Image: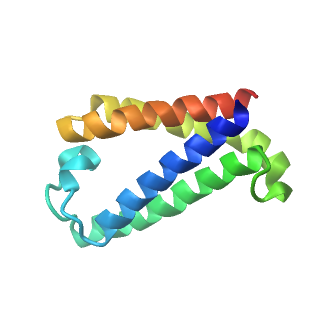
Amino acid sequence: MILVSAILFSILIFIVILFQAALALGAPWGEYAMGGKFPGKFPPQMRVACIFQIVILIFLGLIVLSKVELLLSSWSSFAKVAIWFVVAFSAVSTVLNTITKSVPERRIWAPVSVLLLLTSLITAVS
């Protein structure tokens, strides 16, 4: 179960990374992110923010995969503690994506956030 959860988390986080990369490159999907505050293409400063978010998301994915020793087994001890940061991050993300004023964002990213939370929690407790 833990391996399936970690892999599902990784697939979902990869989808989020692709979405953030598309926003950074100018995809007109602003209504699906950041509460829909920037409909259409993100302004330059928000595109830079997407790049920072990508780095954070990659780090989260590496923690999860390290916890189950699929990648970076040398991080194993670190990942056993850091996985709780991933769970907390996923919980905050779930709350924010559930209460956003942007209906399209809520419809797409709230379920993804819930799945990220559940899979990170399963990985953490296993």
Residue depicted at 37% across the width and 60% down the height: 20
Image side of residue 123 versus residue 86, left or right: right
The N terminus, quarter of image = top right
Q: Is residue 102 visible?
A: no
Image side of residue 70 versus residue 15, left or right: right
Q: Nearer the viewer, residue 86 or 29?
A: 29
Percent x, y of residue 40: 14, 60
Would you place residue 97 above or below residue 47 in this image? Answer: above
Residue depicted at 23% across the width and 66% down the height: 27
Would you place residue 25 above or below residue 68 in this image? Answer: below
Would you place residue 82 above or below residue 54 in this image? Answer: above
Q: Nearer the viewer, residue 113 or 49?
A: 113
Q: Is residue 116 visible?
A: yes
Task: Indicate the quadrant where residue 113 lies.
Answer: top left
Would you place residue 120 above or below residue 29 in this image? Answer: above
Residue depicted at 61% across the width and 57% down the height: 59
Image side of residue 80 versus residue 93, left or right: right
